[in-house]
Amino acid sequence: MKKFVKSALIGGLIGLMSFTAAQAKNAITYDGRDAQLLHCAALHGIAAQVLQAAGEADQDDLAFAQFYAFMLLRKLPGTEKQQVQAYTQRMQKIMKTRSLGDFIDEYDETSKWCIREFVRNGDDRP
């Protein structure tokens, strides 16, 4: 599990800067409930980074939020590489298509739903 979290953290953060069209071709496409889970993971990952950048979260808070996001990713089908690629791509799309205010509004509106649907209700995926 440590290997997954380490590779996902590195891939997610570095990948935000370097995700290419060629990589997108090899990425898996998620739909339905899997796409919702992916979106929730991306929202939490971005929120942690935004809060840390604003000085509202320390390194431990960031690590916990990223760990939570990657625990969600583990529920998705595909390889770790595909999961990280999809996560990175989703984070990039969110960051490119929303202002900070819009992102905060979306996070406030959906984060509790994400937790309820994928954590508290015991989502049955492994």
Image: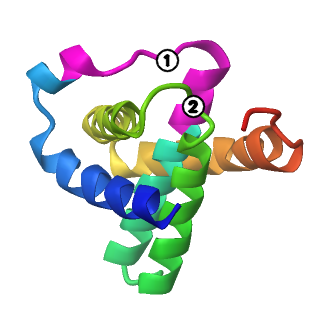
The residue sitting at 33% across, 37% down in the picture is: 81
The three-letter code of the residue at mark 1 reads Tyr
Magenta region includes residue 32: yes
Horizontally, residue 53 falls left or right of residue 74, namely left
- Given residues 26 and 92, the one toward you in this image is 26
Specify the label residue 30 is tagged with.
1
Disc 2/disc 1 C-alpha distance (Å): 8 Å
Report crowding for label 1: few under 14, some 14 to 19, many 20 or more residues within 10 A (C-alpha).
some
- Given residues 109 and 33, the one toward you in this image is 33
Could you say where residue 11 lies in the image, as x and y percent from the top left? 26, 51
Horizontally, residue 53 falls left or right of residue 31, namely left
Q: Which residues are magenta?
A: 24-39
Specify the label residue 57 is tagged with.
none
Q: Kindly report which numbered mark, 2 or 1, lies closer to the viewer in this rendering.
A: 2
| Label pair 2/1, CB-CB below 8 angstroms | yes
Specify the label residue 76 is tagged with.
2
- Quadrant of the image occupied by residue 77: top right
The residue sitting at 53% across, 63% down in the picture is: 67
Could you say where residue 93 lies in the image, as x and y percent from the top left? 31, 31
Q: Magenta span: helix, strand or loop, mainly? A: helix
